[in-house]
Image (tube, rainbow, N blue to C red):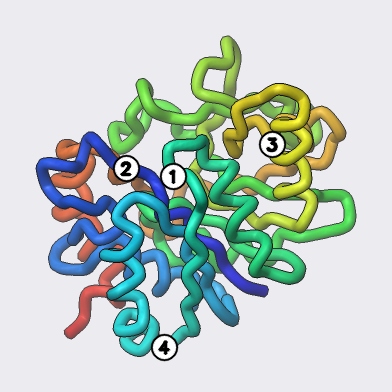
């Protein structure tokens, strides 16, 4: 199993802190390095990092990060980083054979989340999304979150930022099969813009989009989307506690 990290977007809300969101430091450790360390801890054999905005800057540091973390890292540059994130998924998935962990570069996780998610595959699933029932958590930005409505089986019925009814929030971590990139392509062919959520909805409509409940343990279920200065300040304060092994030395 490999891992795919989407690191192509502009990150306008963090631009005053860093010219590149994936390279934004959290207590001295770049976001992209935290993602690489999570991928390695979850058992990934290699990591494909999809670049776009500030691609040269990010790609220039990947060899050193690969050596420091101890995992092979390969860059895949998307043709147009201004397109929705599903295009980045398709660009990165071309470099991966089989199932893979999919993460956003600006999401950070307690290691247990990715480790447990990696064990959730099965023949009834085209994709499995890590979800959180704690929709009122102060760590979640309700104006930017992606919401999920589940069916009686715990599979996804609807997913998106503006769906009218939901019961959990998308954590930004997936165990994907090759079906996911194909589904995004189908959504685009059907007239959609190409977001990851649109591809997820294609699989949801087929009953192929499962969820993994990360639970509510304070340590094992900690995660954040570091998308603006408020979240960045919280991450600087909290990440060294919940990701302590990544901040040693």
The residue at 47%/84% (across/down) is: 71
Q: Could you say whether the residue bearing mark 4 is in a helix, strand or loop?
A: loop
The residue at 21%/81% (across/down) is: 248
Residue 204, compared with residue 88, is above or below; it is above
Q: CA distance from mark 3 to mark 2?
A: 21 Å
Q: Could you say whether the residue bearing mark 3 is in a helix, strand or loop?
A: helix
Which mark sits nearer the N-terminus, 3 or 2?
Answer: 2
| Relative to 114, 13 lies left or right | left
Q: CA distance from mark 4 to mark 3?
A: 32 Å
- Nearest to the eye among marks 3 and 1: give it: 1
Q: Label 4: few (<14), some or many (≥20) within 10 Å?
A: few
Can you identify the residue that label 2 sits on?
A: 10
| Relative to 219, 86 lies left or right | right
From the top left corner, tell me how far across and down residue 149 is, in percent. Answer: 65, 24
- Nearest to the eye among marks 4 and 2: give it: 2
Which mark sits nearer the N-terminus, 4 or 1?
Answer: 4
**Label number found at residue 146:** none
**Label number found at residue 199:** 3
- Nearest to the eye among marks 3 and 2: give it: 2
Labels 3 and 1 touching (C-beta < 8 A): no
Residue sitting nearer the eye, 31 or 183 = 183
Can see residue 192? yes
Can you identify the residue that label 4 sits on?
A: 70
From the top left corner, tell me how far across and down residue 53 is, in percent. Answer: 34, 50
Q: Quadrant of residue 164?
A: top right
Which mark sits nearer the N-terminus, 2 or 1?
Answer: 2
The residue at 58%/44% (across/down) is: 87
Residue 174, compared with residue 37, is above or below; it is above
From the top left corner, tell me how far across and down residue 7 is, in percent. Answer: 41, 55
Q: CA distance from mark 3 to mark 1?
A: 18 Å
Residue sitting nearer the eye, 174 or 153 = 174
């Amino acid at each position: 199993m490999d891992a795919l990290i989407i690191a192509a977007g502009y990150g306008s809300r963090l631009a005053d802190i860093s010219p590149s969101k994936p390279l934004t430091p959290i207590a001295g450790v770049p976001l992209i390095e935290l993602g690489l360390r999570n991928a390695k801890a979850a058992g990934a054999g290699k990591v494909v990092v999809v670049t776009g905005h500030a691609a040269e800057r990010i790609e220039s540091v990947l060899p050193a990060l690969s050596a420091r973390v101890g995992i092979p890292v390969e860059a895949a540059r998307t043709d147009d980083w201004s397109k929705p994130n599903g295009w980045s998924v398709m660009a990165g998935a071309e470099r991966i054979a089989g199932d893979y962990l999919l993460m956003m570069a600006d999401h950070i996780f307690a290691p247990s989340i990715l480790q447990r998610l990696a064990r959730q595959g099965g023949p009834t699933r085209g994709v499995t999304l890590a979800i959180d029932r704690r929709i009122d958590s102060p760590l979640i930005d309700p104006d930017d979150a992606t919401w999920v409505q589940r069916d009686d089986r715990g599979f996804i019925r609807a997913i998106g930022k503006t769906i009218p009814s939901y019961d959990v929030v998308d954590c930004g971590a997936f165990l994907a099969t090759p079906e996911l990139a194909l589904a995004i392509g189908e959504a685009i062919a059907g007239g959609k813009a190409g977001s990851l959520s649109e591809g997820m909805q294609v699989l949801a409509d087929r009953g192929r989009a499962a969820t993994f409940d990360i639970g509510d343990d304070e340590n094992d279920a900690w995660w954040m989307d570091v998308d603006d200065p408020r979240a960045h300040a919280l991450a600087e304060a909290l990440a060294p506690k919940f990701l302590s092994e990544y901040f040693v030395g």
